[in-house]
Amino acid sequence: MSDTFLHRLFSLEGQNVLVIGGTGVLGGALAEGIAQAGAHVIIAGRSAERGGERVAAIEKLGGQASFLPVDVSQRGS
């Protein structure tokens, strides 16, 4: 299969994707994969420190990301 075909099939270019739990191991891996598909990833989680680390890791891979502090156990969050 050509790279062009796969890019057209799976590209997320121009999309914004919110990954709740993106500061964790599984959510973080998902966020990195989504970023590599071209989306701007919003890492949502409780830990600003881990969120910043994940954003830095995604940017190091050439992707775009930002962090949003969210606690899903708090309705107002």
Image (cartoon, grey):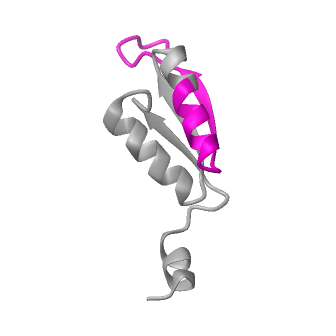
The stretch drawn in magenta includes residue 65: yes
Start and end of the magenta stretch? Answer: 53-77
In the image, 50: left or right of 68?
left
Residue lying furthest front: 60
Q: Is residue 71 part of the magenta span, yes or no?
A: yes
Q: How far across and down, in percent of the image, does residue 10 sit?
A: 48, 70
16 and 37: which one is in front?
37
56 is higher (above) or lower (below) than 77: below
Q: Which image quadrant for residue 8? A: bottom right
Query: Does 66 appear above or below 46?
Result: below
* Residue at x 55%, y 51% (from the top left corner): 35
In the image: residue 38, left or right of residue 26: right
Give the x, y percent position of residue 74. 40, 11
Q: Residue at x 53, y 81 (%)?
A: 3
What residue is drawn where x is 55% and y is 37%? 57
Above or below, comparing residue 39 to residue 55 in the picture: below
Q: Tell me what residue is drawn at x 63 percent, y 49 percent.
A: 63
Percent of width and height locating residue 60: 62, 43
Q: Position of residue 1 (x, y in %)?
A: 43, 88
Number of marks: 0
Furthest residue toward bottom: 1
